[in-house]
């Protein structure tokens, strides 16, 4: 289902205040139907509040938004029939088993008794939870809980899915599983709004990203555009022989035209580098010059670096401000 | 990289399985309000099944109350434990069931502190369905508490002149009032921050109401101003009606008053709870 503009989510000037705090302070969003869109920001930036308004859990104090063409306030009930939400706290009932959770939701979504059971079994199987199906959810690991949570969100395939920090606190394996699931949903045509604190997560999954700070969108674009506009990224090199560091420093500075940072580790140095080709060339140049390399990495800018570049202050500081 | 070992593609089994599990075809018709509420009632039953400990309070407290009141105060207040038991059992029945109503607020508040309520609230269902469904779990708790009191009473020698019919009638009257009162505590449950706070506030409010009633002493022995309070206390009305039924001397007026009070409480506090639930952030 698409609207006339092909947009699944359109928000204009959304505002939500809690007492004195403007948690969301004029957020605009335009999310193409069928895409994965990342909302990136530190804790307290207004991501969750934005998602809660779009999912009709919170009434905006200002501005407006439409989901698949339906107003989130006036047509909230219609919107609820099209979206599903996977909240930051696992949105499943810990005192029930995995199977009971899914049957419960299937029943609430209108499936008959037998159909609900069959649907639950199908989902448990697809998400690798069949063995744990009869156990109470409070005994599940973080990854299992997340998978159940997402399974619960697709008991009936939603048109739009809101995912609030789906991998926060997960180990890398579980995180990859969640990413695979998100990709599968996107491939099947579900529009996904993904809130995250991790730039690489948005980079991996999203075709568009909005960076949000103090309740406002401060930058927007594709992951590539965003990184390019910030011009960040760091080439980290560690040498086998610390004595070669001055030579490596001079060579990298010449190759990349940026100031080189000498790390505390006497064998390590780093240099800003936003272009992977030039980074690779510089490393090859080091090798040709006889500098022996222990390891190297072209690091993506972290959320912290993006933040620093966009706002002039680190993300943690932003969190503290919100908490204050 | 043609001379290197063959490139490996990470297996996409997970993706394929998930994709296969996506429901295609038309959405099922929406669940009706009654069906949604009943589904939440089923959830309540499952919780009792998985966490039976929650019934311990409900069963042990009434046993303790019955024993303590009968044997500690019986001799002093009524001259004999037997006579006192005969007098207080309807009061203990009311007290035990009504204390249980606080748990409705505690349960709702506990739910609110978990993420699952966000999911319920984002579903296309009749919005108060979770609240209506919880009533079913409440009913089980009330009946357990009430049955325990009556069973312990009978074991200690309580003999209702109203017979089984009177006891069942009394239980129904008390439970009816409990349904009304539980909405007061669900409202409190929506307003306070933590389950413990709901528990404390609930008992703080209920204790004086339960004791300043005609349940445990003859109101005529009280100072005049306190007797006046006892007379207007709805919990006295509940006990009067229950006592009438259990003693085989039911009064339609007393019962009607209790039912009216239950309806009034429900009419005020059920919509208030539903409104707070709907507009909650």
Image: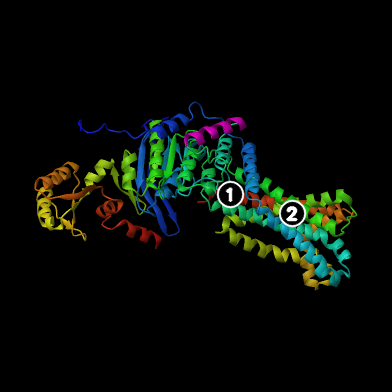
Give the quarter of the image for residue B156: bottom right
Q: Which residue bears the numbered disc 1? A: B275
Q: Position of residue B163 (x, y in %)?
A: 89, 51
Q: Is residue A75 visible?
A: no
Crowding at dot 1, Cα within 10 Å, few <14 / some 14-19 / many 20+, comes out as: some
Secondary element under disc 2, as helix, strand or loop, is helix
Q: Which residue bears the numbered disc 2? A: B145
In screen coordinates, is B61 left or right of A276?
right
Magenta stretch: includes residue A116:
yes
Q: Where is residue B138 in the image (x, y as percent from the top left)?
A: 68, 49
Locate the N terminus of chain B and report the quarter of the image it occupies. Answer: top left
Crowding at dot 2, Cα within 10 Å, few <14 / some 14-19 / many 20+, comes out as: many
Q: Position of residue A146 (x, y in %)?
A: 46, 44
Q: Do labels 1 and 2 share a chain?
A: yes
Secondary element under disc 1, as helix, strand or loop, is helix
Q: Which chain carries label 2?
A: B
Front tag of 1 and 2: 2
Region of the chain picked out in magenta, as a range: A113-127
| Magenta: main secondary structure | helix
Q: Is residue B208 visible?
A: yes
Vertical comparison of B259 with B226: above or below = above
Identity of the residue drawn at 60% across and 56% down: B189
In screen coordinates, is B36 left or right of A34?
right
Magenta stretch: includes residue A189:
no
């Amino acid at each position: 289902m698409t609207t006339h503009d092909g947009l699944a989510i359109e928000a204009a000037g959304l505002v939500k205040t809690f007492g004195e705090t403007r948690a969301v302070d004029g957020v605009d969003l335009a999310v193409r139907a069928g895409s994965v869109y990342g909302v990136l920001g530190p804790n307290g930036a207004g991501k969750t509040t934005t998602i809660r308004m779009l999912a009709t859990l919170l009434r905006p104090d200002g501005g407006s938004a439409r989901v698949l063409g339906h107003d989130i306030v006036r047509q909230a009930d219609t919107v609820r029939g099209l979206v599903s939400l996977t909240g930051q706290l696992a949105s499943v009932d810990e005192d029930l088993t995995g199977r009971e959770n899914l049957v419960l939701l299937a029943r609430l979504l209108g499936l008959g008794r037998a159909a609900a059971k069959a649907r639950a079994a199908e989902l448990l199987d697809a998400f690798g939870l069949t063995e744990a199906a009869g156990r109470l959810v409070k005994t599940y690991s973080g990854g299992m809980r997340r998978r159940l949570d997402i399974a619960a969100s697709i008991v009936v395939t939603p048109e739009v899915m809101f995912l609030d920090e789906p991998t926060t606190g997960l180990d890398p394996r579980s995180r990859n599983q969640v990413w695979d699931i998100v990709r599968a949903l996107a491939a099947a045509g579900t529009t996904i709004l993904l809130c995250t604190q991790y730039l690489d997560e948005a980079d991996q999954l999203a075709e568009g990203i909005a960076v949000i700070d103090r309740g406002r969108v401060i930058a927007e674009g594709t992951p590539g555009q965003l990184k390019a506009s910030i011009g960040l990224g760091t080439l980290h090199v560690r040498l086998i022989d610390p004595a070669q560091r001055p030579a490596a420093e001079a060579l990298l500075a010449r190759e990349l035209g940026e100031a080189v940072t000498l790390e505390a580790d006497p064998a390590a140095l780093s240099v800003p580098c936003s272009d992977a080709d030039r980074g690779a060339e510089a490393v090859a140049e080091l090798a040709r010059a006889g500098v022996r390399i222990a390891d190297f990495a072209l690091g993506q800018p972290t959320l912290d670096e993006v933040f620093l570049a966009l706002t002039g202050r680190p993300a943690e500081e932003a969190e503290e401000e919100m908490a204050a | 990289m043609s001379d290197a070992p063959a490139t490996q593609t990470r297996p996409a089994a997970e993706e394929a399985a998930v994709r296969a599990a996506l429901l295609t075809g038309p959405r099922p018709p929406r669940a009706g309000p009654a069906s949604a509420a009943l589904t939440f009632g089923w959830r309540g039953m499952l919780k009792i099944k998985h966490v039976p400990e929650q019934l311990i309070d409900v069963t042990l407290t009434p046993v303790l109350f019955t024993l303590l009141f009968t044997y500690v105060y019986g001799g002093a207040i009524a001259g004999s434990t037997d006579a006192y038991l005969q007098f207080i059992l309807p009061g203990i029945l009311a007290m035990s069931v009504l204390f249980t109503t606080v748990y409705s607020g505690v349960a709702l508040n506990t739910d609110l502190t978990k993420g699952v309520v966000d999911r319920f609230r984002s579903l296309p269902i009749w919005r108060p369905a979770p609240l209506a469904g919880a009533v079913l779990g409440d009913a089980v708790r009330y009946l357990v508490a009430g049955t325990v009191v009556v069973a312990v009473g009978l074991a200690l020698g309580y003999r209702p002149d109203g017979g089984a019919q009177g006891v069942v009638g009394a239980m129904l009257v008390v439970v009816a009032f409990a349904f009304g009162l539980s909405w007061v505590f669900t409202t409190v449950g929506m307003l306070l921050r933590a389950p413990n706070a709901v528990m404390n506030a609930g008992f703080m409010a209920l204790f004086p109401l339960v004791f300043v009633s005609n349940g445990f002493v003859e109101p005529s022995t009280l100072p005049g101003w306190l007797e006046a309070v006892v007379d207007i206390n709805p919990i006295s009305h509940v006990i009067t009606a229950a006592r009438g039924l259990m003693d085989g001397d039911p009064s339609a007026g007393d019962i009607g008053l209790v039912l009216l009070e239950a309806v009034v409480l429900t009419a005020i506090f059920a919509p208030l709870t539903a409104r707070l639930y709907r507009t909650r952030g």
